[in-house]
Image (cartoon, grey):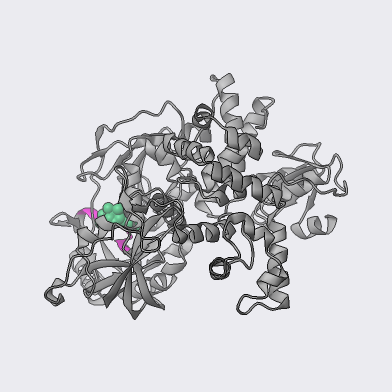
């Protein structure tokens, strides 16, 4: 951990972390690894512990503070949170617009069209620029106070920046989960035998209602704001709302994602463009929202039932198709989880032919009553893997049986069972061939040792030929064995042997991942590697030590202990090391081009990660600091450089581009 010297350095580091939050959550382009981020955050927290009287309100540590309380209170909204009438066709959009024309008795009306974000609504209050309250929509009038959970969202500022900060401001928007985060979360949950979320919306809504803000923080929620309660007190037009929010440093849609439209045609063409671009977004939307731009007309327009007449949603059709379930097969994972997968009559959906859909687990099959032979609707949501939405029971043939995941492993035929606290059914045999092959495949995969040219198919061939019976056999492969594999010639043999050799210098975290310990994902592997530093220590960690590592819980600790108690696992690790695997990579001798030179990095680099650039500078004898001063030698400026760039200019510090940096290397 980096020790903070003084208050100035603390302020600079807080600023730096806020900048990183923005790159991660707003620009979706992180500049540093999660590990490096946590390291900086730890430094901030340890300084704050020593200086409790000087903690900045904007400090990222406050998002995960121990002081956050559990449980929700109920709070009334200062202006009700409404919902929108839905439209599904161009005709319906035209009806909506015509109604507005008629009620306002003129046709010269502008509309702001925006994204309809697919998450869960929130209202956030700032008192004198300080985030004081965040309440869910609830019944529209009263919602749950989830302030502490909202504070964990890194793109939402805890204090407002900018000119003319209002005394009281209540902003409104949508909390959601980035698609990538959603996939990672579900993958982890599946590995841990937990229920998966059906879509990012459910994951976001479920996460926001968790009682432990620390857990919410791990869910990495995101937010985009689109409105202000009593907006007419601040601006005259909806189109200005986005700019107003942006000026206060609040996260709002980017300029391509809202448009001032003068006619139904313009609205429809905006909707069509957004529908096309939808797949490229890093979050889910389910349509657009059309709002009369002039806020002064809202009162006159009034309501129909519970919906306001000044706005409407236009919902996109979900990507769905109808097909038949021809079979349900059981796939086995590396931890023995048996996953039911529907084999579908191939059908075209959202740009590709679909022939499989995951059915997740027995509960999911029971809930939807999915059976072999059923005609089903499949849908492609945020997840790339399509899912079965529902069964068309009217078309179900008579006498087809309910589907039950067998209580025997389809590969080794040993007992498969459901453990008390899990939804998954697992094969319990430690020697199951299916599980073993998956484990080997995982070891070589990108998630673990990342052995290029050793994909799942090649590993399967090696396993079936008996060349890899245990993990360490990978390191005994030679030309003679590889030449017996189908399609393997001189070049592919050479490539594979080189990648295997290269993998011997993996990181400790990659190695831990490769061991395939139950409940250990990449985050936990990083934590373990960071704590243990070497394999010997790793093997001897006690439960007490494991539990002392922030981020490692009871279940993971037990799984780690259980793994290292098993003599067979220790024997395998020792063999891997004997064959040359050396996770404590020794440093190569590198020339000291940057000896004693001080660098500051700003903006995003193309060819390097921030960590990568820092490492290269340090390896060459240089130093990297977080703020520009007269002692700085070089400012390495990437895309969209921040305030450090301006400061460097002011102090006449040499600013170098990424290209210049490369040539210096
Ligand atoms: S405006 C009357 N704008 O859609 C205005 N809502 O059914 C009410 N939503 O609960 C909200 N994106 O959660 C508005 N750009 C957007 C939106 C949006 C998503 C959600 C919001 C609301 C629901 C309306």
Q: Is residue 497 above or below residue 653?
A: below
Classify residue 131 as left or right of residue 374.
right
The one nearer the camera, 644 or 634, is 634
Q: Is residue 566 above or below residue 66?
A: below
The one nearer the camera, 457 or 344, is 457
Q: Quadrant of ligand 1?
A: bottom left
Where in the figure is residue 585, as x and y percent of width and height? 73, 47
Image quadrant assignment for residue 275: bottom left
Where in the figure is residue 116, as x and y percent of width and height? 34, 60
Whether residue 166 is visible here, answered yes or no, is no
Residue 327 highlighted magenta (yes or no): no
Where in the figure is residue 85, as x and y percent of width and height? 21, 61
In magenta, the rendered stretch is: 289-299
The one nearer the camera, 643 or 320, is 320
Image quadrant assignment for residue 77: top left
Q: Residue at x 38, y 38 (%)?
A: 149
Classify residue 240 as left or right of residue 530.
left
Q: Is residue 111 above or below residue 302?
A: below
Residue 293 highlighted magenta (yes or no): yes
Q: Quadrant of the C terminus?
A: bottom right
Q: Is residue 315 above or below residue 661?
A: below
Whether residue 564 is visible here, answered yes or no, is yes
Where in the figure is residue 162, as x and y percent of width and height? 51, 41
Instruction: Report the number of discs.
Output: 0
């Amino acid at each position: 951990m980096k020790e903070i010297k003084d208050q100035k350095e603390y302020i600079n580091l807080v600023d730096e972390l806020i900048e990183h939050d923005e790159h991660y959550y707003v620009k979706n382009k992180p500049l540093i690894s999660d590990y490096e981020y946590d390291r900086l955050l730890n430094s901030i927290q340890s300084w704050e512990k020593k200086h409790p009287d000087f903690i900045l309100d904007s400090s990222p540590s406050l998002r995960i503070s121990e002081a956050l309380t559990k449980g929700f209170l109920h709070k009334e909204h200062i202006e009700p949170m409404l919902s929108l009438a839905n439209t599904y066709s161009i005709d319906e959009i035209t009806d909506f617009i015509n109604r507005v024309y008629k009620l306002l008795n003129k046709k010269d009306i502008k509309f702001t069209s925006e994204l309809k974000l697919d998450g869960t609504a929130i209202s956030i209050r700032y008192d004198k620029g300080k985030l004081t309250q965040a309440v869910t929509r609830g019944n529209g009038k009263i919602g749950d106070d989830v302030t502490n959970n909202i504070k964990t969202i890194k793109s939402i500022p805890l204090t407002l920046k900018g000119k003319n900060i209002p005394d009281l401001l209540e902003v409104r928007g949508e909390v959601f989960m980035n698609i990538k985060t959603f996939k990672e979360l579900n993958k982890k949950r599946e590995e841990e035998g937990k229920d998966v979320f059906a879509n990012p919306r459910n994951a976001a809504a479920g996460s926001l209602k968790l009682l432990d803000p620390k857990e919410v923080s791990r869910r990495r929620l995101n937010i985009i704001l689109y409105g202000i309660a009593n907006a007419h007190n601040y601006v005259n037009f909806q189109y200005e709302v986005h700019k107003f929010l942006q000026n206060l440093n609040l996260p709002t849609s980017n300029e391509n994602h809202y448009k001032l439209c003068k006619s139904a045609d313009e609205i429809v063409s905006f909707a069509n463009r957004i529908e096309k671009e939808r797949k490229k977004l890093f979050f889910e939307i389910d349509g657009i929202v059309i709002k009369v731009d002039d806020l002064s007309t809202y009162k006159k327009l009034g309501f129909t039932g519970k919906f306001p007449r000044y706005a409407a949603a236009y919902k996109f059709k979900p990507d769905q198709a109808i097909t038949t379930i021809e079979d349900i097969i059981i796939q086995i994972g590396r931890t023995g989880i048996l996953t039911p997968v529907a084999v579908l009559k191939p059908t075209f959906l959202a740009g590709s032919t679909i022939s499989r859909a995951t059915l997740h687990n027995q509960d999911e099959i029971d809930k939807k009553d999915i059976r072999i032979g059923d005609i089903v609707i499949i849908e492609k949501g945020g997840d790339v893997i399509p899912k079965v939405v529902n069964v068309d029971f009217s078309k179900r043939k008579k006498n087809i049986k309910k589907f039950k995941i067998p209580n025997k492993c389809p590969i080794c035929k040993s007992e498969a069972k459901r453990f008390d606290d899990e939804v998954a059914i697992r094969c319990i045999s430690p020697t199951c061939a299916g599980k073993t092959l998956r484990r080997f495949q995982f070891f070589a995969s990108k998630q673990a040792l990342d052995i290029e040219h050793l994909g799942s198919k090649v590993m399967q061939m090696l396993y079936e030929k008996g060349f890899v019976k245990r993990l360490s056999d990978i390191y005994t492969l030679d030309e003679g064995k590889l030449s017996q594999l189908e399609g393997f010639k001189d070049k592919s043999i050479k490539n594979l042997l080189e990648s295997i050799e290269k993998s011997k210098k993996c990181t400790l975290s990659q190695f831990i991942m490769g061991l395939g310990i139950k409940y250990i994902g990449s985050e936990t592997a990083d934590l373990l590697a960071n704590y243990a530093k070497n394999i010997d220590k790793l093997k001897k960690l006690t439960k007490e030590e494991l539990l002392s590592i922030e981020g490692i819980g009871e279940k993971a600790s037990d799984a780690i202990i259980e793994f290292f108690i098993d003599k067979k696992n220790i024997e395998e690790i020792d063999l891997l090391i004997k064959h040359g695997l050396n996770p404590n990579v020794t440093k190569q001798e590198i020339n000291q081009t940057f000896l004693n030179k001080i660098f500051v990095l700003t903006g995003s680099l193309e060819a390097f990660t921030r960590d990568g650039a820092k490492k290269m500078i340090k390896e060459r004898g240089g130093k990297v600091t977080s703020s520009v001063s007269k002692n700085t030698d070089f400012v390495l400026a990437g895309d969209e450089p921040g305030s450090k760039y301006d400061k460097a200019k002011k102090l006449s510090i040499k600013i170098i581009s990424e290209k210049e940096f490369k040539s210096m290397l």
